[in-house]
Image (spheres, helix red, strand yellow):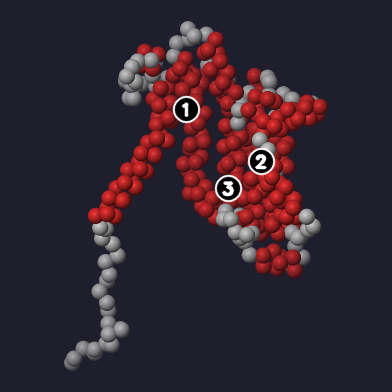
Amino acid sequence: MQPAILPTSQQPQPKANKRKRLGVGEWIAEIVKYAVLILLAITFVMPFYWMFSSALKNDAQVYVAPPIWFPSPAFWNNFPDAWNSQPFTQYMMNTLFLYAVPYTIGVVLSSAIVAYGFSRIQWKWRDTLFYLCLATMMVPFQVQMVPLFMIFKQLGWINSFLPLIVPAFCGSPYYIFMLRQFFRTIPSELSDAARIDGASEFDILFRIMLPLSRPALTVVALLSFIGAWNDYLGPLIYVHDQSKFVLALGVENLQRTFSFNSTIANAYPYLMAVSTLVVLPILIIFFFGQRVFIEGISMTGLKE
């Protein structure tokens, strides 16, 4: 029995070689591209590695020339000794629970509410006020510093975290812009259907919009938290008692102590050790959240 002869269009075709062969010019371009990327990666990683390696040295290794890149022996006890030289555990608790977490909650919540009003609710002067909100980003903090300090002083909020936290519950123009652009990518039919079913605007925001906006909200939360964690100028202006210091002020206080007493042994390695420990939580957060972070940035398009 002769096998059936299939039409040419139905005959199985040999699998195409999916791997495209690169020409000489394309190979050179790829090599140059990766060389540039590796060079940039080394450039960005080098300062952190220098800080970490300096934290493992003693005075004899720090000030030697040429510099030692791989300290031997490594003084790992510099980390606990430097951390215990000041109440850094209390500074970390102040930073985390009295500043960074309340600040992040305030920024995310208020910015989402304002962004929803600018994106999904029709009201008079909406676009005008939105552009006015964006224009406030052009005013640097140094210009607002003195008036804000006088206002908070009149309110009796100096030497507390209220000047740092309360304004966060009024929203941030940059995050309002980000969330507004993201909300505009969500089909308006969802909101319209919810309104027909009798849902209020807050129901639509908290039960429909926010669950669909997790990537954008995650980006806002991460950026807000990192900004509060690294903030130095705000706590320096409003917080005076050492018991209320945050980590940035603690590191500066440690550096000032070493400057006044130059005879302290391992001052520079201790400073590098504390700086490494302060930066470490941010690196861990970014390492585990980079996928969501990049996804949120890419999804926060500029759709109009």
Measured as percent of width and height from the top left, residue 86 is found at 56, 18
CB contact under 8 Å: marks 1 and 2: no
On the picture, is 128 further left or further right than 105?
Answer: right
Q: Which of marks 3 and 2 is in front?
A: 2
x and y, in percent, of residue 278 in the image = 52, 28
Residue pictured at 52% horizontal, 47% vertical: 293
Residue 60 % position (x, y): 36, 13
Q: Mark 1 points at which residue?
A: 276
- Distance of mark 3 from mark 1, alpha carbons? 25 Å
Q: How far apart are marks 1 and 2 (CA)?
A: 33 Å
CA gap, disc 3 to disc 2? 25 Å
Residue hosting label 2: 138
- Mark 3 or 2, nearer chain start: 2
**Amino acid beneath label 2:** Met
**What number is the disc on residue 218?**
3
Q: What residue type is labelled 3?
A: Thr
Compared across the picture, whether 48 is left or right of 169 comes to left
Residue 111 is tagged as none
Dividing the picture into quarters, in which one does residue 301 lie?
bottom right
Residue 129 at x, y percent in the picture: 75, 50
Residue 169 shows in this picture: yes
Amino acid tagged 1: Thr
Which of discs 1 and 2 lies nearer the camera? The answer is 2
Quadrant of the drawing holding the C terminus: bottom right
SS of the residue at dot 3? helix
Classify mark 1: residues with Cα within 10 Å, few (<14), some (14-19) or many (20+): some
- Label 2's element? helix
For image coordinates 67% across by 67% down, the residue present is: 189
The crowd level at tag 3 (other Cα within 10 Å; few <14, some 14-19, many 20+) is: some
